[in-house]
Amino acid sequence: MIRIIPLLLLFNFFEQFSYSQDSVLLVGGINRYAEIPPQQLENAHLRVWYEFNHPIKKDSKRQVMRDTMFLVAGNRYSVYYDWSRELKYKKMIGQLDFAKETTESIIYSSFDKFLEVALDDQRLSEFKMNRDNSEILKDRQQQILTTTDMNDTDLLKEDFYLLEEKMAPQVWQVHSDTMFFLGYKCQRATCNFRGRDYSAWFTTEIPLSDGPYKFYGLPGLILSVEDSDNQIQFRAIGIEQLTGVVIVTENKNNFIQCTPEQYKKVKKRMKETVVLYYSRGVSLFVTKRFVPAEYIPIELTNE
């Protein structure tokens, strides 16, 4: 029987933002404008909270960014995503609204003239963005991994992307050393995954061959993963049973399907500082979306 781990550090979040176990969990639900209803896949029975530590570059210095991630799993499917992405989206919209109120309008006679003036940074207000819209859906039976994402760098049009790929082979070497993690007896395993060497701790007390991000393939749930350079770390901070939660997915036609190379370019564009504008009559209001840090990719190769 799965034990419930208290999430003491997260109680203050729940006081403001509750999550109902009777609600439907939307996998691929990032497309708010989809006309085709989502397809139900299966009931979810487990949710794992992971603290995700990853490196960034800010002001030319390397720092560590911390995010809290969800892994919601059923017998066949699981979905992994940033639990606070909607909160970050609302915060971004609030920042943008404030930027609009404080941005100086530019009267222009031609678009070329507008660009000439708009590129003068002294006339731009700016707002910061730090969020990740992506979801990772694992189909462990068919060995298919589907990543969906939203590119909202264009204020006038949001684009939704889908990357479908075979789950990358992860050749794990299981070692004899053990430790207790969140009250579960865990065993260590190591592998190389897309350019990095990882060490993981998994427990057979939860016989689910899954884990955070794209990790899977061990005879138990992965509770901790860390790369050999101590840059990437996923660490479980809570586990809970679920009832009344259904994993769903959207129709692929709602998304722009892309290759791994195309998706990398899209993600790079999402992480760049860009100039945004909107018009009102013959006036253009300009602001700059400022990404405060350079993100270092988890995957160094496609293999």
Image (tube, grey):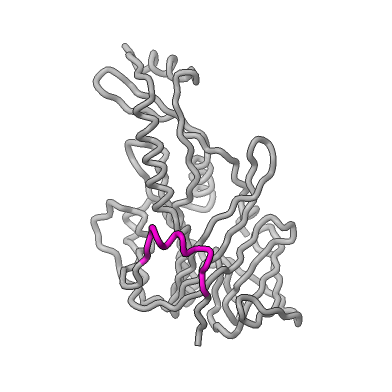
| 209 to the left or right of 20 | right
Q: Quadrant of residue 157?
A: top left
- Stretch of the chain drawn in magenta: 6-19
| 134 to the left or right of 248 | right
Q: Residue at x 54, y 49 (%)?
A: 261
Depth check: give the residue in front, 152 or 122.
122
Q: Residue at x 42, y 62 (%)?
A: 14
Q: Is residue 300 visible?
A: yes
Depth check: give the residue in front, 111 or 26.
26
Q: Residue at x 38, y 59 (%)?
A: 17
Does 13 appear in magenta? yes
Q: Is residue 257 visible?
A: no
Residue 81, horizontal then vertical, whole percent: 47, 60
Rendered view: 219 above or below 66 = below
Residue 171, horizontal then vertical, whole percent: 67, 72
| 220 to the left or right of 73 | right
Rendered view: 224 above or below 54 = below
Does 59 appear in magenta? no
Depth check: give the residue in front, 161 or 66.
66
Depth check: give the residue in front, 236 or 278.
236
Rendered view: 24 above or below 186 = above
Of the 4 image quadrants, the one containing the C terminus is: bottom right
